[in-house]
């Protein structure tokens, strides 16, 4: 089984740029989902004083492998992503456990 890694994208403070490039970003992520690399993704709920962000759950062996898979994301290519954090994650309980543990 591949590892499960969680990626936190922190976005720049430019809602118009985010909205402009969102369709291409989602189309790119859909290709990763089709290959089984991307398990889940979506925007984070806004927090008071927090920048816009997105969370992605991916299969991969290492953080570098996941970063390489995401390198062509239009959000990265267009400078929408201000910061990326990648961490390994070991799901142990929950209704989706079978989905992320296959």
Image: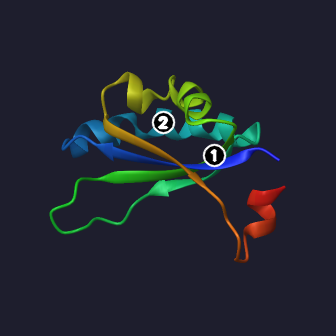
Left or right, residue 30 beside residue 75: right
- Element class at badge 2: helix
Q: Is residue 19 above or below residue 28?
A: below
- Quarter of the figure with residue 100: bottom right
- What is the distance, in whole Å, between disc 1 and disc 2 at their CAs? 15 Å
**How far from the left and from the top, in percent, is residue 73?**
49, 29
User: For mark 2, what is the residue?
Assistant: 25
User: Which class describes the residues within 10 Å of circle 2: few (<14), some (14-19), or many (20+)?
Assistant: some
**How far from the left and from the top, in percent, is residue 79?**
30, 27
- Element class at badge 1: strand
Left or right, residue 1 beside residue 9: right
Between tags 1 and 2, which lies in front?
A: 1
Task: Indicate which disc, 1 or 2, sits on the residue closer to the N terminus.
Answer: 2
Left or right, residue 93 beside residue 21: right
Identify the image quadrant of the C terminus.
bottom right
Q: Which label sits on residue 58?
A: 1
Residue at the far left: name it: 49
Front in this rendered view, residue 22 or 47: 47
Front in this rendered view, residue 26 or 72: 72
Residue plotted at (51% across, 23% down): 72
């Amino acid at each position: 089984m591949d590892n499960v890694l969680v990626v936190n994208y922190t976005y720049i403070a430019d809602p118009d740029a985010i909205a402009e490039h969102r369709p291409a970003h989602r189309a790119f992520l859909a290709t990763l989902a089709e290959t089984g690399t991307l398990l889940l993704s979506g925007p984070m709920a806004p927090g008071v004083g927090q920048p816009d962000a997105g969370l992605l759950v991916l299969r991969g062996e290492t953080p570098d492998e996941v970063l390489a898979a995401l390198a062509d994301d239009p959000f990265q290519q267009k400078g929408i992503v201000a910061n990326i954090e990648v961490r390994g994650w070991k799901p142990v309980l929950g209704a989706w456990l079978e989905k992320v543990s296959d």
